[in-house]
Amino acid sequence: MFGNIDYIRLLIIAVIPGVALSLALYLTDRYDREPFKLLLKVFVFGAISTLPTIVVESILTRLNIFVGVLNAAYSAFIVAGLTEEFFKREVVMRFAFKHPAFNERLDGIIYSAFSALGFATVENIMYVVSGYQANPYIGLMRGVLSVPAHMLFAVTMGYYLSIVKFANDPGTRQHFYKKSLFVPVILHGIFDFILMSNIGILTLVFIPFVIYLWVVNIRKLNIYYKESKNS
């Protein structure tokens, strides 16, 4: 049985990755920094969005009629990928997208990432506290892989949401609004499917895929960072 000190220690382990990445993003946005209260609001509601996500994921899991690889694909792309990315994007759309502070392209990435990291922090708490006895290193593994992955999916989401925000053509806005959900879902689904499928050969591509996520999304972040710097 855990004592209060043990739970506090686990809570700290679970919270640190999300807070650290949020701080890193906040410091990155140094030329036109977003209001702290708005960022905190997006982070908190990203965390709260885990509640409807749990409900929807529970329903979708009950509807899962597949077995084997198809079961893993359904769980990865539909139950986890689609549901989680949908609610994380809803937080951005409801609280930040129309806010006057969203006034440059980098902002889409910042707000999307804060929503995702709020979500990932609560998710991490649930996994770390409930799974510690089975695997005491689960906090470390999720801190290195899963929490940053949520941020990287969000960079892609925010990249496209910024195009939506500043595009003049309705067709362009509609196209990239769809991509702001569809592409993160695909990336999220691939990430989870590799881990869920129990297909040995796929483990060989997991680290290359994680590296790919970092490279592609750092490039996206740099495009808008340089634009912010030069504006």
Image: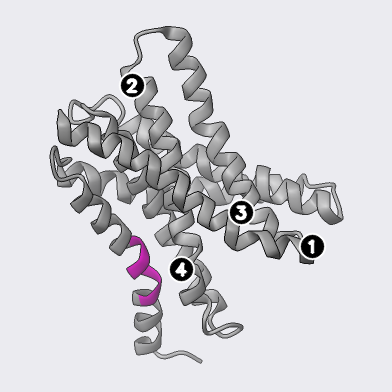
**Circle on res. 165:** 2
- Residue at the image point whose x is 38% and y is 47% from the top: 218
42 or 21, nearer to the observer: 21
- Residue at the image point whose x is 67% and y is 42% from the top: 78
Q: Which stretch is magenta? A: 13-18
The amino acid sitting under disc 4 is: Val
Residue 127: percent from left, percent from top:
52, 69
**Circle on res. 144:** 4
Image quadrant of residue 160?
A: top left
- Residue at the image point whose x is 33% and y is 69% from the top: 16
Against 190, is 126 above or below? below
**Circle on res. 199:** 1
Against 144, is 1 above or below? below
Q: Nearer the viewer, mark 1 or mark 2?
A: 1
Is 50 left or right of 109, judged from the image as shown?
right
User: Of the residues under marks 4 and 3, which one precedes in the sequence?
Assistant: 4
Examine the structure image and report whether residue 186 is included in the region drawn in magenta: no
User: Of the residues under marks 1 and 3, which one precedes in the sequence?
Assistant: 3
Report helix, strand or loop for mark 1. Answer: loop
Q: How many marks?
A: 4
Between the residue at mark 4 and the residue at mark 3, the CA separation in whole angstroms equals: 14 Å
**Circle on res. 191:** 3
The amino acid sitting under disc 1 is: Ile
